[in-house]
Amino acid sequence: MAFTAKLELRQSHSLVMTPQLQQAIKLLQLSNMELTAFVEAELERNPLLEREEADDTGGAGQGDAAEVEARLFADAKQEANGQAADAVDAAEGDTAGDDGEWLDLQADDRGGQADDLDTEPQDASPEGDSFATGALKEGGWASLGQGPRLDGDDAPNLEAYVAEVRTLKDHLADQLALVFADPARRLIGHHLIDMTDEAGYLQGDLAALGELLGAPLDLVEETLTVMQGFDPCGVFARDLRECLTLQLKEQDRCDPAMAALIEHLDLLATHDLAALKRACRVSDEDLCDMIQEVKRLNPKPGLKYGSSPSQPIVPDVLVRPLPDASWHVELNSETLPRVLVNQAYYACVCKSATSKHDKSYLVDCLQTANWLVKSLDQRARTILKVAQEIVRQQDAFLTYGVRHLRPLNLRTVADAISMHESTVSRVTANKYMATNRGLFELKYFFTSAIAAAGEGDAHSSEAVRHRIKEMIEAEPASEVLSDDKIVERLKLDGVDIARRTVAKYREALRIPSSVQRRRQKRIAAGASA
């Protein structure tokens, strides 16, 4: 069989993911904190990028995309080599995916006290008075007894004078130094402190610790027993039962009935009062008092120390109502990095670059800087466009509340703004919108639809969950609503929903069943009585 060679021409289409396009896609789905960190890294790496100083007299971000571009990206008019970042809209990507504490733990607020300044004049002579008067005329009280005012890099670092937040391990280490004088026990104690988590619970095996240190297990257990009396009460416990028991012993309330209650915490979690009463052998009134006493204990005593302050969420989009009942949508200028390309520095450095490697490096830096500025501009435009469409679609929610939240999916928004569905998915990831109704993630506005019982419009699943929560919160103790009863009421309101869906939504809201709620209301009624 003979083989012959021939030449054929074929034409095909394919999407080429250039590095610049990949960068634009990556920037689109970053949160504002991740974007800030990325831009800071680029500023350190690329000598042609520089941070644009914010104008102190400037106002908030403008809603018009062109004004945002002019204000934030002064050098965005330069065109980059290669594909435009508009190809992001056509790129394929991932689509959007789909036991409470007894007590609110409060962290200790610790603040330092500033030393009072002595502003009384030391010299009572007329010359001293004259000097003080002259000083007041020139610089006010701040100039008396103080050096010249320092600004910029010469100003003192105020953060260096802020008191350090004491952690739980620091607090325990101080007590350890006062309680134990034996070096062996101190060594064991330091290892036990290292084995304690932030909630105050001991993690790890005592036998393994004794083997590691070459210490008898009895000595390790004796040291632990002493350290379980440290402040805060309940620390160094190995489970919840031991933590609560330590606190009850400190209050001299660990009698046999209370010990039986702690031993049957599983029955307390399900509010099985009949079984608890049999286990503790007490009356209904005593059982209610014991339960309320246990609920006043702290299940995580270590969180009082060294708890880091929660990082507030900074919104990416700001929405405010206008007098004509419309909505003004603008980008939050604080979340948008201000960078520009230093063309003057590039022109200066190019004159001194002689080798091919240096010239290639400068060209690469210029191209990367231009693409970053253009990608940031495209990201701002895209976020603003998606946010404006979400506000248009959910106008009733912003006006009347969550009951009027409309069912919405990514395709609806993508078709309305002529973008790809994957682009909308990336825009809504890790982005937040501040409205008159509160602060919401952009994904919050995308909910599935539940059919109407009649011929009306479909209902948002989030709105239905809100209705279920309102019904249960308003139910009286004498008439606890079952899931079937909730289904009947929703159908009267025009919502066609199944019982299993109601149960699923109730569990997602962490609302117990009707049987458990009835038991809870009985306990609350007994405690109030």
Image (spheres, rainbow, N blue to C red):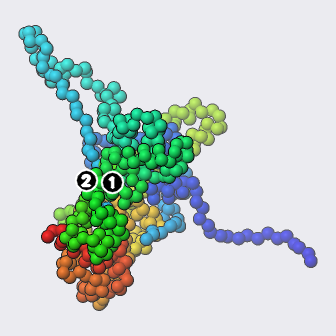
- Residue at the spot 56% in from the left edge and 32% down from the top edge: 351
Q: For residue 56, which quarter of the picture?
A: top left
**Which percent across, then down, holds residue 215?**
52, 42
C-alpha span from label 1 to label 2: 9 Å
Q: Which residue is mark 1?
A: 246
Assign a secondary structure to mark 2: loop
Q: Is residue 112 above or below residue 78?
A: above
Label annotation for residue 251: 2
Type of amino acid at the residue the image marks with label 1: Leu
**Which percent across, then down, holds residue 10?**
71, 70
**Which percent across, then down, holds residue 183?**
46, 34
Count of numbered circles in the view: 2
Q: In the image, 11: left or right of 180?
A: right
Assign a secondary structure to mark 1: helix
**Which percent across, then down, holds residue 391?**
31, 67
- Residue at the spot 47% in from the left edge and 41% down from the top edge: 188
